[in-house]
Image: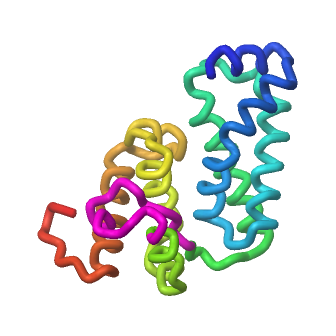
Amino acid sequence: MEELIQKAKNGDKEAFTTIMLSLEKDLYKIAKTRLKNDDDIYDAIQETIIEAFKSIKKLKNTEAFKTWIIRILINKTNDIFRRKKHKKEILLEDIKNTEILNSYEEKDIDNLLDFNFMRKQLKYEDSVIITLYYMEGFSVREISDALDMKESTVKSRLYRGRKQIAEMYGYKVKEGRV
């Protein structure tokens, strides 16, 4: 991937296209945590791709590419969110790697988390952090860098989000453990 990123930085449009196609699903999932309809999601992704293409030469560290592009995406989704004046509540996407949902088959996770009441349960910031951590495999430090917040804030929001999800599904949560 780093070789492709370097080629893209040097102006190789095909390398840039290959990178974007490989990130398409990830970008969609992240954008969906903020935006409710597909038109807005695809607008955010398109704006992100345009912005990234225009400024990829400014990227200093190719290893930080994914964090960099996700930060652009989050800014674009926030712009669209403000323009459309959506409510600040969201629908949380899949959480594949959590003990709370281990008893369900992977195909059922989307259905479980698609209930309307989920829209009102988690704050936007918590859902983005949970998505980045569980779905995209980002570390706490990477999330902290991408969202420009303290690592301790990321950790507390992860805890709070997991606790809320556990409670929604009827699990008793012991203090200090989710």
Q: Image height check: is 118 above or below 14? A: below
Q: Image height check: is 125 above or below 8? A: below
The one of 95 and 54 positioned closer to us in this rendering: 95
Residue 158 in the magenta stretch? The answer is no
Q: Image height check: is 49 above or below 15? A: below
Q: Image height check: is 19 above or below 119? A: above
Residue at 57 percent across and 27 percent down: it is 64
Residue at 69 percent across and 76 percent down: it is 86
The one of 146 and 177 positioned closer to us in this rendering: 177
> In the shown orientation, is residue 119 left or right of residue 20?
left
Q: Position of residue 137 (x, y in %)?
A: 44, 42
Quadrant where the N terminus is found in the figure: top right
The part of the chain drawn in magenta is: 91-108
> In the shown orientation, is residue 176 left or right of residue 85?
left
Q: Position of residue 121 (x, y in %)?
A: 44, 79
Q: Main secondary structure of the magenta part?
A: loop
